[in-house]
Image (cartoon, rainbow, N blue to C red):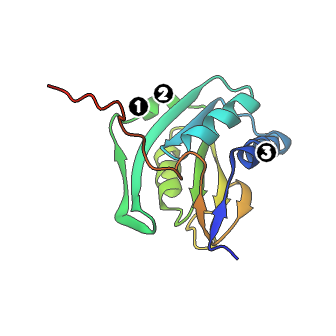
């Protein structure tokens, strides 16, 4: 028994297509897919392609500082999205996981009052999330290893040092 949910690249491909299909089956047609950086960028791009939505925006929100450690509240980082660019559009906000749900809630509230319609989509949702995403691929209470963030950052192995 593992204490982590492991998402492989192959499973991610299935997840992204199934999540996009759920959006399409609902009748919701986003004008914009808004990916929450960093974890939501890969899913957002994949879902935008699957939905044939060419308008892909990003917002950078910091909340997690490590495994199970967070800031007190999520913080939007610059450059900030000009919310008026979303006026009267249908927006699909995409993130990798709604853990506490606070990041997704922050972006959802940021969009409301400007957009014609906003919906949320996540690969995973946890039971403690303060927001219920409109589209969820899988529910879990485990820590998730995503294929894009499991390995440590790459380093310069050339041995060349700056002078």
Circle 3 residues within 10 Å: few <14, some 14–19, many ≥20:
few
Residue drawn at x 62%, y 74% is 3
Residues at discs 1 and 2 in contact (Cβ within 8 Å): yes
* Residue 47 picture location, percent across and down: 69, 37
33 relative position to 24: left or right: left
Give the percent coordinates (x, y) of residue 130: 55, 68
Disc assigned to residue 14: 3
From the viewer's perspective, tell me whether residue 43 is left or right of residue 16: left
- Identify which residue is drawn at 69% across, 44% down: 9
Is residue 40 left or right of 24 when viewed as pictured?
left
**Nearest the eye: 102 or 115:** 102
The quarter of the rendered structure image containing the N terminus is bottom right
Quick check: 25 above or below 32?
below
Q: Which residue is mark 2?
A: 85
Whole-number angstrom distance, CA of label 1 to CA of label 2: 6 Å
Q: Which residue is mark 1?
A: 82
């Amino acid at each position: 028994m593992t204490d982590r949910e492991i998402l492989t690249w192959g499973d991610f491909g299935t997840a992204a297509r199934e999540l996009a299909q759920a959006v399409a089956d609902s009748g919701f047609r986003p004008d914009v897919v808004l990916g929450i950086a960093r974890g939501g960028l890969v899913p957002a791009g994949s879902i935008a392609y699957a939905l044939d939505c060419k308008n892909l925006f990003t917002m950078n929100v910091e909340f997690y500082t490590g495994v199970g450690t967070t800031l007190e509240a999520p913080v939007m980082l610059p450059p900030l999205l000009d919310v008026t660019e979303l006026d009267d559009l249908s927006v699909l906000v995409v993130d990798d996981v709604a853990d506490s749900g606070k990041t997704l809630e922050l972006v959802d509230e940021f969009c409301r009052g400007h957009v014609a319609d906003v919906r949320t989509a996540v690969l995973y949702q946890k039971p403690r999330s303060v927001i219920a995403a409109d589209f969820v691929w899988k529910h879990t209470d485990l820590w998730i290893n995503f294929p894009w963030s499991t390995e440590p950052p790459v380093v310069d192995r050339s041995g060349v040092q700056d002078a």
